[in-house]
Image (cartoon, rainbow, N blue to C red):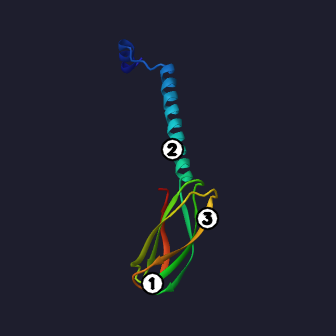
């Protein structure tokens, strides 16, 4: 018997098998709970997300741009989008916030007109969100 074993026996510091099993079981339950919480958070964020696909834009004249886009959002929720027009140096020359009422379909297509303060070279959807 080593000195360490004698001291452990003398002062009651032995590690029982049962204690190790309980420790690993508690650790396993905590790890499982953490993975489940992470999974639920990921699913919840994907359910509440809005995806945008820019389809086309057209420079109508020196003061107007039309932007056509498709968005995918949760049915039954209002949506707001920021649509912008940019010049050739990517400066914002027109900006518009548009709110769309709740719809039953998952995907929707829209065409919006953006007034500009100077001639634009492109139009795009900056972002969409659930207000």
Find numbered disc 1 in the image and state the secondary structure of the residue it sits on: loop
Cα–Cα gap, marks 1 and 2: 48 Å
Measured from the top left, where is residue 79 in percent x and y? 52, 59
Cα–Cα gap, marks 2 and 3: 30 Å
Find numbered disc 2 in the image and state the secondary structure of the residue it sits on: helix
Which residue lies under the disc numbered 3?
Answer: 108
Q: Earlier in the sequence, mark 3 or mark 1?
A: 1
Give the number of the disc on residue 39.
none
Which residue lies under the disc numbered 1?
Answer: 63
Q: Earlier in the sequence, mark 1 or mark 2?
A: 2
Count neighbours of disc 1 (C-alpha within 10 A) and say few if under 14, some if 14 to 19, many if 20 or more: some
Which residue in the rendered view is the most extreme toward the top? 10
Q: Could you tell whether 30 is left or right of 92 in the image? A: right
Is 90 in front, or is 31?
Answer: 90
Measured from the top left, where is residue 35 in percent x and y? 53, 41
Measured from the top left, where is residue 32 in percent x and y? 53, 36
Marks 3, 1: nearer the viewer: 1
Is 39 in front, or is 6?
Answer: 39
Q: Is residue 84 above or below residue 107?
A: below
Q: Quarter-wise, where is residue 1 in the image?
A: top left
């Amino acid at each position: 018997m080593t000195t360490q074993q004698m001291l452990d026996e003398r002062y009651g510091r032995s590690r029982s098998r049962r204690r190790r099993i309980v420790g690993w079981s508690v650790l396993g339950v905590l790890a499982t709970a953490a993975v489940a919480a992470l999974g639920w958070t990921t699913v919840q964020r994907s359910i509440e997300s809005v995806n945008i696909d820019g389809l086309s834009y057209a420079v109508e004249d020196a003061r107007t741009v039309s932007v056509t886009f498709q968005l995918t959002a949760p049915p039954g929720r209002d949506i707001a989008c920021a649509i912008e027009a940019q010049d050739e140096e990517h400066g914002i020359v027109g900006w518009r916030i548009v709110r769309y009422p709740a719809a039953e379909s998952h995907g929707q297509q829209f065409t919006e007109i953006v007034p500009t303060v100077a001639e634009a070279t492109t139009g795009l959807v900056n972002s969409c969100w659930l207000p």
